[in-house]
Amino acid sequence: MPELPEVETTVRGLQKVLIDRTFVDVWTDIQKFTKLKKELKNKKIKKIWRRGKNIIFDISEDYSLLVHQKMTGHFLYDNWNKEDKYNSYIHLKFFLDNGRVLAFSDLRKFAKVKLLKTKDLIKELDSLGPEPLEKGFTFNKFKEALKNKRGKIKQVLMKQEVIVGIGNIYADEILWETKIHPFKDVSKLTEKQLKDIYQSIKKTLRKALKMGGTSTSDYRNIKGEKGTFGKVIKAYRREGEQCYRCKTKIQRKKINARSTCFCPKCQA
Ligand SMILES: [Zn+2]
């Protein structure tokens, strides 16, 4: 699933090409999206922004189009890379007034694409926690977000109501980086460990964003190209490979049916 760096990369790509464009038509082969054809016609894109893993298009007549890419969804614009099979599961096409096409590839078809009045966005987004890359996200804010939270740190980091934007990839990376066991209970973390996690969240997400995100699975940018963070990954999906610090084999364990990869020695 795309996480903050991937969604932000997409949003920045879309901002460059779609501001002030008008939707002229929509094609889809997914029943629940057919009404978009009528709803979006002649509406103009005014602003594109991100909140957590959501992409929001503010459009004319006080409407917003809310998109959550879920597992495998990603936008593709105009002349995207068609060689890559991950760009071929097109289930939505937005035709624009400049003659170009904005397409949406989604192998699993779980993505949410929903038109609503801009004023109703608040209801959709109000359960979300703070944005980790915002200046206002201080160490105190981070501690506040974790206050009274129980459970394994890995799971808590991935809860969007605690902090937005972190999923399986970056949670594994942050915990490897800080040498903290993913199953450690949040309430047992020391002040030093909390500080390390806080700093690693910012550092890891910023670095991944700079590298255009991670494309070990379906994620591609709007040109259909891969992000390069996958090349510097330390723990995520590295089961059986050597830890870059201590050469111990990376282990994989499940929490709630989701895999966690970590070094059993450094992250003891
Ligand atoms: Zn290690």
Image: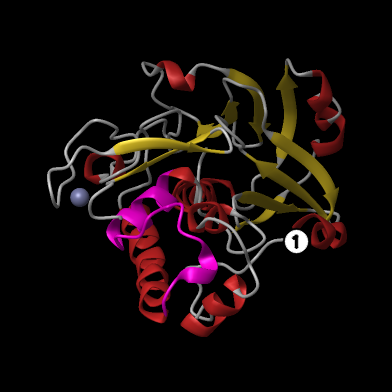
Position of 261 with respect to 27 (left or right) is left
Name the residue rendered at 73%, 37% in the picture: 113
Evaluate whether residue 187 shows in this view.
yes
Residue 212, placed above or below residue 123: above
Where is residue 255? Give x, y as percent: 53, 40
Q: How many numbered discs?
A: 1
Residue 68 located within the stretch drawn in magenta: no
User: What residue lies at 75% left-to-right and 19% top-to-bottom?
Assistant: 30
> Which segment did they paint magenta?
169-190
- In magenta segment, residue 173: yes
Residue ID at (53%, 47%): 14
Mark 1: few/some/many CA within 10 Å (<14, 14-19, 20+): few
Q: Quadrant of residue 146?
A: bottom right
The amino acid sitting under disc 1 is Ser
Residue sitting nearer the eye, 99 or 170: 170
Callout 1: SS: loop
Q: Position of residue 243 (x, y in %)?
A: 18, 44
From this view, report whether residue 100 is shown above or below residue 123. Answer: above
29 lies above or below 167: above
Quadrant of the image for the C terminus? bottom left
Which scheme is used to colour this image of the protein? Answer: secondary structure
In the displayed structure image, the side of residue 108 where residue 241 appears, left or right: left
Query: Picture quarter containing residue 252?
Result: top left
* Residue at the spot of label 1: 127
